[in-house]
Image (cartoon, rainbow, N blue to C red):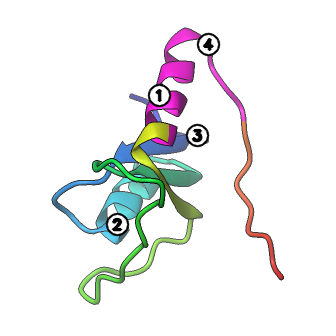
Amino acid sequence: NNLVGKIAIVDRGTCSFEIKAKNAQAAGAVGTIIANNADGDTPPGLGVDANTQDPTIPVLSVTKAAGAALKAALQNIPQSGQMFRAVG
Protein backbone atom coordinates (compact mmCIF):
# COMPACT_ATOMS: atom_id res chain seq x y z
CA ASN A 1 0.00 0.00 0.00
CA ASN A 2 1.15 3.52 -0.79
CA LEU A 3 1.47 5.44 2.49
CA VAL A 4 2.90 8.69 1.09
CA GLY A 5 1.03 11.57 2.71
CA LYS A 6 -1.31 9.24 4.61
CA ILE A 7 -1.88 8.18 8.21
CA ALA A 8 -0.98 4.51 8.61
CA ILE A 9 -2.99 2.18 10.84
CA VAL A 10 -1.04 -0.82 12.07
CA ASP A 11 -1.72 -3.59 14.57
CA ARG A 12 0.21 -3.93 17.79
CA GLY A 13 2.47 -6.96 17.59
CA THR A 14 5.94 -8.34 18.03
CA CYS A 15 8.10 -5.27 17.31
CA SER A 16 8.21 -2.03 19.29
CA PHE A 17 5.87 0.88 18.71
CA GLU A 18 8.82 2.98 17.60
CA ILE A 19 9.83 0.45 14.94
CA LYS A 20 6.25 0.34 13.64
CA ALA A 21 6.14 4.14 13.45
CA LYS A 22 9.61 4.38 11.88
CA ASN A 23 8.59 1.82 9.22
CA ALA A 24 5.45 3.80 8.43
CA GLN A 25 7.48 7.03 8.33
CA ALA A 26 10.03 5.45 5.98
CA ALA A 27 7.12 4.48 3.69
CA GLY A 28 6.03 8.14 3.57
CA ALA A 29 3.26 8.15 6.21
CA VAL A 30 2.57 11.44 7.97
CA GLY A 31 1.23 9.74 11.12
CA THR A 32 0.70 6.31 12.65
CA ILE A 33 -2.21 4.83 14.57
CA ILE A 34 -1.39 1.63 16.43
CA ALA A 35 -4.41 -0.59 17.13
CA ASN A 36 -4.20 -2.84 20.17
CA ASN A 37 -4.18 -6.58 19.48
CA ALA A 38 -5.90 -7.42 22.78
CA ASP A 39 -9.42 -6.63 23.95
CA GLY A 40 -9.88 -3.89 26.51
CA ASP A 41 -11.17 -0.38 27.07
CA THR A 42 -7.78 1.31 27.39
CA PRO A 43 -5.41 1.89 24.47
CA PRO A 44 -1.92 0.52 25.03
CA GLY A 45 0.80 2.84 26.28
CA LEU A 46 3.48 3.68 23.74
CA GLY A 47 6.68 2.35 25.26
CA VAL A 48 10.19 3.50 24.46
CA ASP A 49 12.70 1.49 22.43
CA ALA A 50 16.17 2.68 23.41
CA ASN A 51 17.63 0.96 20.32
CA THR A 52 15.49 2.89 17.81
CA GLN A 53 15.61 6.57 16.95
CA ASP A 54 12.32 8.29 17.74
CA PRO A 55 10.00 8.84 14.78
CA THR A 56 9.28 12.43 13.81
CA ILE A 57 5.67 11.79 12.80
CA PRO A 58 2.77 11.74 15.29
CA VAL A 59 1.89 8.36 16.77
CA LEU A 60 -1.12 7.36 18.85
CA SER A 61 -2.66 4.14 20.07
CA VAL A 62 -6.29 3.01 20.06
CA THR A 63 -8.22 0.07 21.45
CA LYS A 64 -8.72 -3.09 19.42
CA ALA A 65 -12.39 -2.15 18.88
CA ALA A 66 -11.52 1.37 17.69
CA GLY A 67 -8.87 -0.05 15.36
CA ALA A 68 -11.41 -2.49 13.89
CA ALA A 69 -13.89 0.36 13.36
CA LEU A 70 -11.27 2.48 11.60
CA LYS A 71 -10.23 -0.41 9.34
CA ALA A 72 -13.87 -1.17 8.51
CA ALA A 73 -14.50 2.48 7.56
CA LEU A 74 -11.44 2.43 5.30
CA GLN A 75 -12.72 -0.61 3.41
CA ASN A 76 -15.58 1.35 1.87
CA ILE A 77 -14.27 4.81 1.03
CA PRO A 78 -11.14 6.83 1.67
CA GLN A 79 -11.28 8.79 4.89
CA SER A 80 -9.55 12.00 5.89
CA GLY A 81 -8.43 13.09 9.31
CA GLN A 82 -5.89 15.00 11.32
CA MET A 83 -3.65 14.12 14.23
CA PHE A 84 -2.79 16.70 16.86
CA ARG A 85 -1.86 16.82 20.52
CA ALA A 86 -4.15 18.66 22.89
CA VAL A 87 -2.17 20.44 25.58
CA GLY A 88 -3.61 21.01 29.02
Is 74 contained in the magenta span? Answer: yes
> Residue lying furthest front in this view?
41
Mark 2 or mark 1: which is in front? 1
Assess whether mark 1 and mark 2 are in contact (beta carbons under 8 angstroms).
Answer: no
Determine which residue is flagged by label 4.
Answer: 77
Mark 3 or mark 1: which is in front? 1
Q: Which secondary structure class fits the magenta region best?
A: helix
**Residue at 26% of width from left, 68% of height from top?**
16
Three-letter residue code for mark 1: Lys
SS assignment at label 3: loop
Residue in the foreground of this view, choosing between 16 and 52: 16
Assess whether mark 1 and mark 4 are in contact (beta carbons under 8 angstroms).
Answer: no
Q: CA distance from mark 3 to mark 1?
A: 14 Å
Is 30 contained in the magenta span? Answer: no
Determine which residue is flagged by label 3.
Answer: 6
> Residue lying furthest left in this view?
14
Mark 2 or mark 3: which is in front? 2
Q: CA distance from mark 2 to mark 1?
A: 19 Å
Residue in the foreground of this view, choosing between 82 and 57: 82
Earlier residue among tags 2 and 1: 2
Answer few, some or many: residues within 10 Å of disc 3's Cα (few below 14, many 20 plus, some between 14 and 19). some
In which quarter of the view is residue 6 placed?
top right
In the shown orientation, is residue 14 left or right of residue 64? left
Three-letter residue code for mark 4: Ile
Earlier residue among tags 3 and 1: 3
SS assignment at label 1: helix
Earlier residue among tags 2 and 3: 3
Q: Position of residue 11 (x, y in %)?
A: 32, 46
Determine which residue is flagged by label 2.
Answer: 17
What range is drawn magenta here? 66-80
